[in-house]
Amino acid sequence: MVNKAKCFEEALQQVRNHRHISLEQADALRQDLLNRHADLKKMEQDLISLIKKQMIAKISSDSLASDLQKEYDALHRQRSAALTELGYAPDVFEPKFNCQICQDNGMLDNGYCDCVKKIAYQKMLEQLNNDLPIDDFNFDSFSLTYYDDLNDRRQMEEVFTFCKQYAKEFSLNSENLYLMGSTGLGKTHLTFSIAKEAVAKGYSVIYCTAQSMISDLEKEHFNHDSISIGENYRNSQLLIIDDLGTEFLSPVAQSVLYNIINTRVLKHLPTIINSNLTATQIEERYGQRLISRIFGCYKTLKFAGKDIRIQKMLISKKV
């Protein structure tokens, strides 16, 4: 599962580590140059002295502060010329930050700087890719050629177009989805594609099978010290539950499953469920409460066609 908070924490630390290194390198270079060039050292001392005098003058005399500023600017230009003559850039003493907006501090008045967000989103993608083979699944690699029946292809074109638009516009206001259809029709492929784009936008995503989620939630149910396990499922900005209907079902499993789905509906957090089960089968397996939540609060996308995995296997055997 993608831990958004941890990714941002690591990204912020990475940016600030670079700031620390940049400051150390700039100071080391500065000390080396001043030790080797007495004239530069004298100018540096004079510049520091002028800065101190300016701070005092600003309190007592605006005119004196202005004169000192002119003196400082003239000496600064003189130092820049001396550095250029020695073969160095005028800003050689300045730290080389990656981000000029926050100077590698990572934070602005309104939150994280974009430099941190960029690194964090990349970490989130890497984390998701470690859990899932998302590099193998995207909208560009989804092929409609495997749906040879004309009606099936038309239906899957509509499903594909909807999912692509859903991913493009994904937000916390996005609707819940119930992807229904037999095994091997592309539900997981399109779900991974949506997850990949949601993570790229900076949303926290949890992908899990129904069995693994219920197993975690049962641990929470019987061990009150494991509350954080369930909190991840309840609060993730996008939860994807795969293979609903394949899990071992017990009264506790049925209860925790309903609670997680119901809680997310009440919190208005988007959830995507993949399943082979029809509405009738869900009602038979889980009861009226769950079917009311899924078919009352989710948009159903019906997948059609023949098992793509089997088609690919038959094609590979022919080759």
Image (cartoon, rainbow, N blue to C red):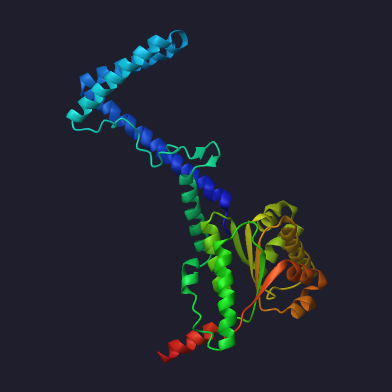
> Quick one: quadrant of the N terminus?
bottom right
Residue 172 horizontal side relative to residue 72, left or right: right
Q: Name the quadrant containing residue 279.
A: bottom right
Q: Residue at x 45, y 44 (%)?
A: 14
Q: Residue furthest top?
A: 60
Q: Position of residue 162 (x, y in %)?
A: 59, 71
Task: From this view, report whether residue 47 is shown above or below residue 84.
Answer: above
Q: Name the quadrant containing residue 229.
A: bottom right
Determine if residue 137 is in view. Answer: no
Q: Position of residue 158 (x, y in %)?
A: 58, 76
Q: Residue furthest right?
A: 288
> Quick one: quadrant of the C terminus?
bottom left
Residue 114 horizontal side relative to residue 214, left or right: left
Q: Residue furthest bottom?
A: 318
Query: How many numbered callouts?
Result: 0
Determine if residue 246 is in view. Answer: yes
Which is nearer the eye, 72 or 184? 72
Q: Name the quadrant containing residue 167.
A: bottom right
Q: Position of residue 105 (x, y in %)?
A: 46, 37
Which is nearer the eye, 247 or 182? 182
